[in-house]
C-alpha cells in the first residue's frame, strides 16, 4: 500500500466535485458513499481497501460538520444517538478488519433486495416519517438502537455505500422517528462508524491522505450546505431525497448484480 499514485489535475477536480456532491447527499439523507467511493475506485492504481479507507477520511469530515449543524438546529435525541453511535463505532472496527478479506460481490444481491424492499415500503406508506411516533420506550428502545447500531456499523466498516440511508430508514421504520430527526441522529451515528473504520485503517497505512483531505474538504462544504437545507425544508424534503438516493442505489446494485452473474 506504500506505492505512490500518479493522479492528474482533472482526476483531482472530479474527485473534489464528487466529494462536494456526496457531502450534500450524505447530510440530507445519507448515501453519499454511492458517489464518493466509486469515484475513488476510478483512480488509476488504487487498491479497493485504499479507496474504502480514503473514502472514510472524506466522509468523516463531512459528517462532522453536518452532525454539528443538525445538533445545533434540530437537537437530535441523544437517548437514541448515544447508544447507537457507541455500538456502531465498535462494530465498524470489526467490519473494517475483515473488509479486505470478503469480496463486496458476496453482499451485493442481499443489499439489493433490502434496498428494493425499503424503497417499496417508503413509497407505499407516504405518511411514514412525517411525524415522530416512537414504537418503544425505555430499555426496549435503547436495545433496538443498540442492535441497529451494531448491524449497520459492521456494514459500514465492511463496505459503506448506502450506510446513511440504511440508518435513516431504520430510525424511521423501526424506531418511529420522522425523517428530519432521523437524519440528525443518523449523522451522529455515521460519524461514529467512520471513526471506527479509521481506527483500523489508519494504523495499517491504507489511507491516501492527500486524496482523503482534498475530497474531505469538499465533502465538508457539501455537508454544511445539505444539513442547513434539510433543516430549512423539513421531513417532506428529506423523504423525497431519500427515495431518489435509494432508487439510485437500487439501480447501481442491480447493474452490478447483472454484471456479476450474467455479464
Image (cartoon, rainbow, N blue to C red):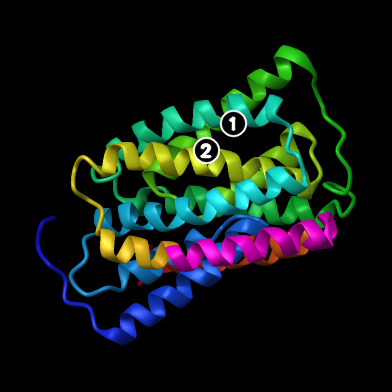
Mark 2 element type? helix
Pointer 2: residues within 10 angstroms few (<14), some, or many (20+)? many
Q: Is residue 206 above or below residue 233?
A: above
Q: Is residue 18 magenta?
A: no
Instruction: Residue at 80%, 18% (x, y): give it.
Output: 137
Instruction: Residue at 83%, 29% (x, y): give it.
Output: 134
Q: Is residue 211 above or below residue 120?
A: below
Residue 119 seen anywhere in this rendered image of the structure:
yes
The quadrant of the rendering that contains the C terminus is: bottom left
Residue 35 seen anywhere in this rendered image of the structure:
no
Quarter holding residue 96: top left
Q: Is residue 136 above or below residue 120?
A: above
Please give the residue where the numbered disc 2 appears in the rendered image: 152
Magenta region, mostly helix, strand or loop? helix
Mark 1 element type? helix
Q: Are marks 1 and 2 in contact (CB under 8 Å)?
A: yes
Q: Give the magenta range.
A: 217-237
| Rendering coords of residue 19 (x, y %) | 47, 68
| Rendering coords of residue 198 (x, y %) | 34, 42
Instruction: Residue at 61%, 64% (x, y): give it.
Output: 25
- Please identify the residue farthest to the left as the structure is shown: 3
The quadrant of the rendering that contains the N terminus is: bottom left
Label drawn at residue 148 = 1
Q: Nearer the viewer, residue 214 or 44?
A: 214
Q: Nearer the viewer, residue 46 or 16?
A: 16
Label drawn at residue 33 = none
Rounded to the nearest whole Å, what is the CA distance between mark 1 and mark 2? 6 Å
Instruction: Residue at 65%, 66% (x, y): give it.
Output: 225
| Rendering coords of residue 155 (x, y %) | 45, 41
Amino acid at each position: 500500500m506504500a506505492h505512490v499514485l500518479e493522479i492528474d489535475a482533472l482526476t483531482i477536480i472530479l474527485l473534489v466535485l464528487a466529494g462536494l456532491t456526496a457531502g450534500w447527499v450524505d447530510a440530507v439523507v445519507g448515501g453519499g458513499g454511492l458517489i464518493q467511493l466509486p469515484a475513488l475506485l476510478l483512480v488509476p492504481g488504487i487498491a479497493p481497501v485504499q479507496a474504502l479507507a480514503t473514502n472514510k477520511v472524506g466522509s468523516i469530515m463531512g459528517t462532522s460538520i453536518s452532525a454539528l449543524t443538525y445538533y445545533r438546529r434540530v437537537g437530535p435525541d441523544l437517548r437514541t444517538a448515544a447508544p447507537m453511535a457507541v455500538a456502531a463505532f465498535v462494530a465498524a472496527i470489526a467490519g473494517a478488519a475483515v473488509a479486505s478479506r470478503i469480496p463486496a460481490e458476496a453482499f451485493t444481491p442481499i443489499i439489493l433486495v433490502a434496498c428494493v424492499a425499503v424503497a417499496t415500503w417508503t413509497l407505499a406508506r407516504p405518511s411514514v416519517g412525517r411525524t415522530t411516533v416512537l414504537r418503544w420506550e425505555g430499555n426496549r428502545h435503547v436495545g433496538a438502537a443498540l442492535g441497529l447500531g451494531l448491524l449497520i456499523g459492521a456494514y459500514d466498516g465492511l463496505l459503506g455505500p448506502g450506510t446513511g440511508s440504511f440508518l435513516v430508514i431504520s430510525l424511521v421504520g423501526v424506531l418511529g422517528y420522522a425523517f428530519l430527526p432521523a437524519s440528525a441522529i443518523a449523522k451522529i451515528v455515521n460519524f461514529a462508524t467512520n471513526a471506527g473504520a479509521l481506527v483500523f485503517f489508519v494504523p495499517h497505512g491504507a489511507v491516501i491522505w492527500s486524496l482523503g483531505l482534498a475530497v474531505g474538504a469538499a465533502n465538508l462544504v457539501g455537508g454544511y450546505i445539505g444539513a442547513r437545507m434539510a433543516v430549512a425544508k423539513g421531513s417532506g424534503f428529506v423523504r423525497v431525497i431519500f427515495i431518489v438516493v435509494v432508487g439510485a442505489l437500487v439501480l447501481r446494485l442491480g447493474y452490478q448484480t447483472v454484471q456479476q452473474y450474467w455479464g
